[in-house]
């Protein structure tokens, strides 16, 4: 089965040389739908391919460039302000996900846009952190009592907070999976292995193994695949960069087991290889396969994930994809919350809570 | 002692004694009296104390009352805008 | 050059409900698809003079206006806007399909086109001088714009002034002028020659109609213009004509406040806006009489005011 044009271009930017106007049109539309247009800009520019592009698609990449630069500046400033707000608490500020990639200067951070900043703090200090943020202008969102309970009790975060003046959102986590999940990656261990960021005192990010595992958990447990391809591409970039470090591959399976994240790692490595051709050593795949689902289930999971991870674009969409995405949504939530709570949560989300759609 | 926050390029435009300034850190744009731009440029030349700045700018500023206090107020306001910091 | 008006109605209908019609508006191409009959008719009317480009190539924006599926189709029929497969807005009542087209075309440009400083303003040109009119709703900007169009002024834009970041020129994006509530009757009376779309009631902005752009403005869409004046219009019943020069630094801030993408553009936007303020005088403009206002604008265009 032919991979979508976007995926082919991400695997090998050189394929764009053969594109006609219609091809560029398709590529940019898939990239926009998958939230990967900024990443595509970075890849094409690094490969020296911007100059061979016709003027019309080229203009779109310049539009994206402005948004990327603005986002990078806003991220640096926002992280700085968060650091200042929490300075008095004596806790290292551990960044997660997109903000972490950006501030640590990782390849995965280039052309990676995100709307919230995620941080990890010790559970015991959650109230102090919330209070300090409020003193510096952040206010809680999701005032509905049900949502408050959802976030505080069942999930692993404070309800998202938003800065009253700047409007930027911060998600404060004390673990990377909710307490109701069947596995418990130990947050103390994650914090103990965190690495400081060069040149930024007080700022830290997860260790490389943990960053990869967190990304895998986020993708394969979250159940919301709107950004599925983008998250898989994050993993591909992280693995590509860290894979070159001595000891990374050798230590990865054991670390996954220690954090009870063997299954998500299996999926992460399997689908990164399938979709992006990530170079994963064979011996690592063999070890990790032992934590995967029973072999009989693999074809089903493969077809579900393969469909779900396609860019959300009419050119890639089939009825089967929509169903696959829904099944995985339900599955994802089951992995995080017990079944009894699940149906109430889904019902409430769909019918009670008004959902304002955010613009892309 | 005061200094410009590293990374501030002080892009500004001035017309008829009033100025606009682009804040590289926050991305905000500020409307300022032209004199404040002079103050910022003086700090860019070299970090200084409130008193030191008052001495350097005495000939160019027209202020009712205590010049040092007025400059002190301006510096506090600029710190609040993340343009300068104490060092 | 092929324009919408040269396409037979049956063919137009087939294209719009099939693979789509590629419409050029200023520097942008829009692939438009719709199965809403009255929308197709209104596009045929309002966009008759606009260039059509061949399909199957690259289009800047992909816009879909379809009858919303489901039970509601027959009772409270709705139109849904899709931007490239995503639906960023709630559906609207079917009657609002054409205003929805205009609003969403604006939205696309203001969200994306960051090679321009985009000011929420009308901009017109005469005698080689462009006048930019930033104005929130209710200021009378569109009534003034619509009136001026009948007196030799070229329309560069009604809602979005595009300023080239490098050379400071205003790049035309001529599109139908939106009129609200009382303005509709005022313009009907003032300009009996004007072609208006059928007024649509009960939108969030009241009753809306659009004025068709003169063919000359569309034909000259490739010609940029040099900005000469920025005028903040303020209609006030009984007010005497008054043009008040604004201090430039303050004008800078006011224009920045009226931009869609000033924040995103960062230092580059700061530079471009500074150069715009250098190049143009900014004024606050109070008026109550449309003919008097037009006389003043004529003098501004001639460099006399």
Image (cartoon, rainbow, N blue to C red):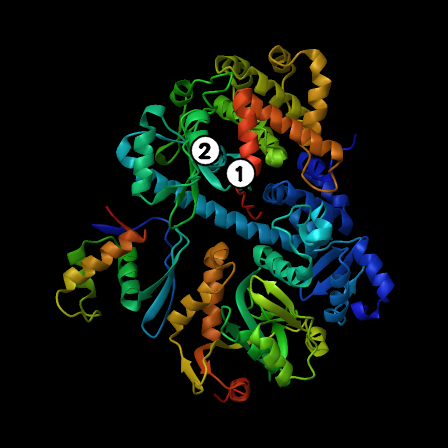
Dot 2 falls on which chain? A
Percent position (x, y) of residue C208? 61, 68
Percent position (x, y) of residue A267? 62, 21
> Where, by quadrant of the figure, is residue C174 drawn?
bottom right
Is residue A139 shown left or right of residue C175? left
Is residue A232 shown left or right of residue A125? right
Q: Which mark is residue C287?
A: none
- The residue at 48%/16% (across/down) is A259
Dot 1 falls on which chain? A
Q: Which mark is residue A146?
A: 2
Q: Residue furthest front?
A: C75
Q: CA distance from mark 2 to mark 1?
A: 10 Å
Q: Is residue C216 above or below residue B52?
A: below
- The residue at 53%/69% (across/down) is C121
Q: Circle 1 is placed at which residue position?
A: A352
Is residue C235 shown left or right of residue A139? right
Q: Is residue C231 above or below residue B27?
A: below
Q: Is residue C18 above or below residue B16?
A: above
């Amino acid at each position: 089965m032919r991979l979508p044009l976007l995926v082919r271009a991400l695997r090998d930017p050189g394929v764009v040389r053969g594109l006609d106007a219609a091809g560029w049109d398709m590529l940019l539309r898939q990239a926009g739908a998958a939230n990967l247009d900024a990443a595509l800009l970075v890849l094409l520019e690094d490969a020296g391919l911007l100059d061979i592009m016709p003027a019309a698609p080229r203009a779109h990449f310049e539009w994206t460039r402005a948004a990327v630069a603005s986002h990078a500046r806003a991220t640096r400033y926002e992280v700085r302000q968060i650091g200042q707000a929490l300075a008095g608490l004596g806790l290292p500020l551990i960044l997660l996900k997109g903000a972490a990639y950006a501030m640590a200067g990782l390849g995965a951070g280039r052309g990676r846009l995100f709307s919230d900043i995620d941080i990890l703090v010790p559970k015991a200090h959650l109230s102090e952190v919330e209070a300090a943020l409020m003193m510096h202008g952040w206010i809680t969102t999701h005032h509905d009592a049900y949502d408050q309970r959802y976030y505080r009790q069942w999930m692993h975060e404070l309800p998202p907070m938003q800065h009253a003046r700047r409007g930027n959102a911060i998600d404060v986590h004390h673990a990377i999976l909710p307490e109701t999940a069947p596995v418990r990656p130990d947050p103390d261990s994650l914090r103990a292995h965190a690495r400081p960021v060069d040149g930024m005192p007080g700022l830290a990010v997860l260790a490389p193994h943990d960053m990869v595992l967190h990304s895998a958990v986020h993708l394969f447990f979250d159940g919301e695949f709107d950004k599925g391809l983008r998250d898989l591409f994050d993993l591909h970039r992280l693995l590509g960069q860290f894979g070159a470090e001595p000891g990374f591959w050798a230590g990865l399976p054991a670390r996954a087991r220690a954090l009870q994240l063997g299954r998500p790692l299996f999926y992460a490595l399997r689908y990164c290889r399938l979709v992006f051709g990530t170079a994963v050593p064979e011996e690592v795949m063999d070890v990790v396969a032992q934590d995967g689902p029973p072999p009989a289930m693999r074809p089903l999971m493969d077809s579900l994930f393969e469909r779900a991870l396609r860019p959300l674009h009419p050119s890639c969409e089939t009825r089967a994809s929509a169903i696959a995405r829904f099944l995985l949504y339900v599955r994802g939530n089951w992995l995080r919350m017990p079944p009894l709570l699940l149906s109430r949560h889904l019902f409430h989300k769909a019918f009670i809570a008004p959902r304002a759609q955010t613009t892309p | 002692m005061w200094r410009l926050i590293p990374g501030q390029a002080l892009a500004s435009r001035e017309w008829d004694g009033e100025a606009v300034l682009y804040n590289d850190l926050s991305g905000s744009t500020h409307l300022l009296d032209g004199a404040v731009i002079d103050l910022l440029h003086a700090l860019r030349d070299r970090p200084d104390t409130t008193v030191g700045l008052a001495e350097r700018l005495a000939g160019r500023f027209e202020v009712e009352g205590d010049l040092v206090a007025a400059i002190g107020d301006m510096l506090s306001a600029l710190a609040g805008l993340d343009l300068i910091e104490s060092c | 050059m092929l324009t919408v008006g040269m396409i037979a109605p049956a063919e137009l209908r087939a294209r719009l409900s099939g693979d789509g019609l590629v419409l050029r508006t200023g520097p942008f191409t829009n692939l438009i698809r719709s199965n809403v009959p009255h929308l197709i008719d209104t596009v045929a009317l309002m966009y008759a003079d606009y260039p059509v480009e061949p399909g199957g190539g690259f289009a800047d924006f992909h816009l879909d206006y379809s009858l919303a599926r489901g039970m509601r189709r027959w009772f409270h029929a709705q139109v849904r806007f899709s931007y490239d497969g995503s639906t960023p807005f709630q559906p609207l009542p079917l009657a609002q399909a054409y205003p929805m087209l205009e609003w969403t075309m604006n939205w696309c440009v203001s969200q994306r086109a960051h090679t321009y400083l985009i000011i929420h303003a009308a901009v017109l040109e005469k005698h080689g001088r462009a006048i930019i009119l930033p104005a929130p709703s209710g200021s009378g900007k569109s009534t003034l714009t619509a009136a001026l169009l009948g007196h030799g002024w070229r329309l560069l834009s009604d809602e979005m002034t595009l300023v080239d970041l490098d050379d400071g020129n205003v790049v035309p994006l001529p599109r139908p002028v939106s009129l609200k509530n009382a303005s509709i009757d005022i313009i009907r009376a003032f300009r009996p020659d004007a072609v208006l779309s059928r007024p649509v009631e009960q939108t969030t902005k009241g009753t809306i109609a659009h004025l068709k752009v003169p063919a000359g403005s569309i034909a000259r869409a490739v010609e940029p213009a040099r900005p000469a004046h920025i005028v903040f219009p303020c209609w006030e019943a009984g007010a005497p004509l008054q043009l008040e020069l604004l201090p430039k630094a303050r004008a800078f801030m006011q224009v920045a406040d009226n931009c869609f993408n000033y924040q995103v553009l960062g230092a580059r936007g700061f530079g471009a806006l500074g150069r715009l303020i250098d190049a143009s005088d900014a004024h606050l403009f109070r008026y109550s009489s449309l003919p008097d206002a037009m006389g003043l604008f004529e003098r501004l265009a001639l460099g006399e005011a």
